[in-house]
Amino acid sequence: MASSSLKSTPLSPSTPLASSKHLSQKSPLQSSLSGITSPHTPNATPSQNPTFTPGCILTPDLCDILSNQIAPSDTDDPAFIPFLRCAQEQLAAYKSLLVQVQNDENALALVQATNDSPQTNRHIKPLKQPKELVRITALSQEEVSKWREVNRRARIAYESLRCHYHLQYIRDPQVRETTKVDRSDLKAFTELHKLGPHLVSYLQADKRIVGPIPGVEIGDIFFHRAELSLLGLHGPIQAGIGYAPGVFVQENEPIAASIVASGGYEDDRELEEDVLLYTGSGGKGRNDSHVSADQSLERGNLALERSMNYRIEVRVIRGMQLEPNSGRKLFVYDGLYRVVDCRRGNSQSGCLVYQFKLLRIRGQNQLGSKTIRIAIETKAKLAENIIPSGYVSPDISGGKEAMPVLLFNDVDKNNHPMYGPMMYEYLKSPEYPFSSKASAMKGCQCRPTCSDKCPCKEKNGGTFAYDNGVLLHGRPVVYECGNGCHCAATCSNRVTQKGIRYQLEVFRSRDTQWGLRSLDPIQAGTFICEFSGDVVLRDIVKQGSECQTVLIDPRKFPMRWHHWGNLSAVFPEWKPFESPVLEEQPEYFLDVSRRNNVACYISHSEYPNAFIQFVLYSHDDVKFPRMAVFAMENIPPLRDITLDYGCSTDLDQGDNSLEGE
DNA sequence: GTTGCATCAATGTC
DNA sequence: CGACATTGATGCAA
C-alpha cells in the first residue's frame, strides 16, 4: 500500500505490536491504545460458522474483527467503562441478514438478501440486538488494506449514486417538482442505508465504534457529510457531536465518539496544533454562528463531558473551506483526541456556552488538516513567485501544461526529471500517427452546448461520460467532443483535452524514487493527467530486436475502470458499461525514455488510488486511445498518487490483460 | 460572488 | 413503537 509519508514516524516503543509482520508500516494508534488491547480467543472462530459462505459479507475477517473487541484492562484507568464483548448470538443474529455479494469482482461493499427480489428486501432492518460500544484494534496491515478496499467501494457506490440522482434531478422535471431541492447526497446515502445498513456503515445499527475506524486513515478527505456517516466515522448527518446514547453503555450514560469541527461557533479556537477548543451544541440557529441562548448539559454536550470522564478517545474531523469563496466544504480526518477539560463560560454574545478542550493523542501521523494547510500555504507562496525550500523547479513542463508541474526534492541532489542522463524533453501529449484523421472524425453540430441528441453522446453508447468534470463510470473508451465538433470549449463533454486542473508536483521519495502528488485535494472520478511519450507501433517492437527503451503498454493496465461507477450492487439490473465496444486493442506502446510527461512519475501500487481510462477526441482510431489517469478515490493533498501498472510479470506482452474481471 | 432561507434526513428522546 | 425535536448541511434564489 502506498505510503505518502516521507518522514520516518518512529513507533512508540511502549508495547510490541500484535502483528510484527509489517513493522515498517505506520500503525502508531495500536501502540497508543495498547493499554486497552489484549486480544482474546474468540468463541466464534470462522470455521465454526459454516453458514457464512465465502464472498459473504460476514467473512471470517469480520467475525474476527467483531470478536476481537477488547474489554479494557484495568491497568489503563480504573474508571474505564467495561465494554461489552461481542457474543456469539450477535453473530448468529446476522445470519437472518445473511446476504451474498453476487459477483465478488464487481460487487461493491453492498449486499442483497438471498432468494428475495431486491424490491422486497429494500427495507430489511437489523434484528433486535443488544447494543454495544466496541473498539477495534490490532488489525494487521493486510486487514487494514482489506477494509480500505471495502470502504472505497462503498464510497464509489455512494458517489455514483449521488451523480445518478443529481442527473435525474437535472433532467427530469417531474422529479424537480416533487423535491424542490437537489439533495442527491442525502438520497444516495439513504438508498445505500436501506440496502445494507449493517455493512455500509458496518456497525452503525447496533454497534458503535469508539476509536479508529478500520480502513480510514488520518488525512483521508471527504466532500460530503454523508460520506462520514457512510463509513461510521461520524454518524449524524448534520450535528457536530456524534455520540452513542445511554443504552449502548453499561452505565447508561451517553458517550461521544466523534466530533466535526468546522468553526461553526464564534467561540471556537485552536490554541496550538494539538489542542482544540470546541464549543458545545445548542443555543443558536442552524446557519448562525451567533449564540443567542444558553446551552445546557444534555445530548452531545453531556456525551462529551462523559467521554472526558471515562477518558474515551474522540475522532476529530475538521471541516475546512475548500476555496475561500465557495460554500463547499472539505472534511479531513485528523485522528484521535481526548477531552481534557469542560467548562461553562460566557460566549462572545454573553450567553452561556460549554467549552471543551481536546488534546490530540500522541504517536499519530501528522494532522491531516495541517498537511492541507501546508499545501494551501505553498500554493499561496508560489502564486507570489516565492519558491519554498525543497522546490527544485516551479514547472518541469516549461509552460507546456495547463498548470505548472512542480518538482520537489528534499531527499537528495538528484534532479533527474529535469536533467536526466539523456536530457528529457517534456511532451504534453503523444503525437498519434493519425492526426490527419482528425478532420475525418465526425463532430457534432451542437451549439452552443451539446443537447440530448448529440451524436457524440450516441458514440458513447447513449449517455454522456461526465457530470461536471466527474467521470460517471468507467467504460472501454470515452469519446469526448473534439476538434470537429461545433460545441463551445465549455462543453461538458470536453474534460481530459483541457489538460491538468490540479497543482501537481513530482517529488523525490525514498520508497519509490519518484512519485506524483497534488497540492490540491483531488475529487474521486476527476481527471488527473494523461500519459505521454513517443508512439511506437506494436508490431515494430515485436519484430524488432529487444528494445532498450522504457515502454508503457496500454494493454497491460488492469481494467480498474470496471470498478469506477459500478452500480450493479445497488441496481441489480445495472450492467457494467461495455459500450462503446472496443473492437480492437491498442496497437501501440509509449516510449518514455526520451520524451515523456508528468504521468510517468506515478508510482505503482496494488491498492491504487487512480486508474487508466481510454479516451478519444483528436482522432477516433480505437487502436490509439489516449491513456487518461482518473482518481479512483478522493486523494488528499501531498498523498502519493498511485496506479496499478499490472507489472506482476515482466516481458509479458500483456495480451491477457483484458480478460478476467 | 455573496447572503439568507427552505428543505433535507438521521438519530436521540419521550 | 411513533411522533417530535434537534442538528457545525446543502443548494438555490435573490
Image (cartoon, coloured by chain):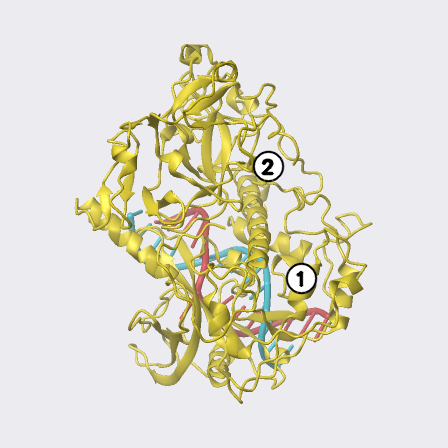
Chain colours: A yellow, B cyan, C red
Q: Secondary structure at mark 2?
A: helix
Residue A30: give its label. Answer: none
Nearest to the observer: residue A273 or residue A28: A28
Query: Picture coordinates of residue A437 (x, y %)?
Result: 44, 11
The residue tagged 2 is A562
Q: Chain of mark 1?
A: A
The residue tagged 1 is A62
| Distance between the alpha carbons at the discs numbered 1 and 2 | 26 Å
Query: Picture coordinates of residue A30 (x, y %)?
Result: 50, 69
Q: Secondary structure at mark 1?
A: helix
Kindly give the residue lying farthest to the front in the view shown.
Answer: A545
Query: Picture coordinates of residue A77 (x, y %)?
Result: 51, 86
Picture quarter containing residue A449?
A: top left
Q: Residue at x 29, y 56 (%)?
A: A374
Is residue A241 in view? no
Is residue A358 in view? yes
Q: Earlier in the sequence, mark 1 or mark 2?
A: 1
| Mark 2 residue type | His
Name the side, left or right, on which A150 lies relative to A170: right
Query: Picture coordinates of residue A382 (x, y %)?
Result: 21, 46
Q: In the picture shown, does residue A614 fall above or below A37?
A: above
Q: In the picture shown, does residue A344 fall above or below A145?
A: below
Which quadrant does the C terminus of chain A fall into? top right
Q: Residues within 10 Å of mark 1 (few under 14, many from 20)?
A: some
| Mark 1 residue type | Leu
Kindly give the residue lying farthest to the bottom in the view shown.
Answer: A78
Q: Are marks 1 and 2 in contact (CB under 8 Å)?
A: no
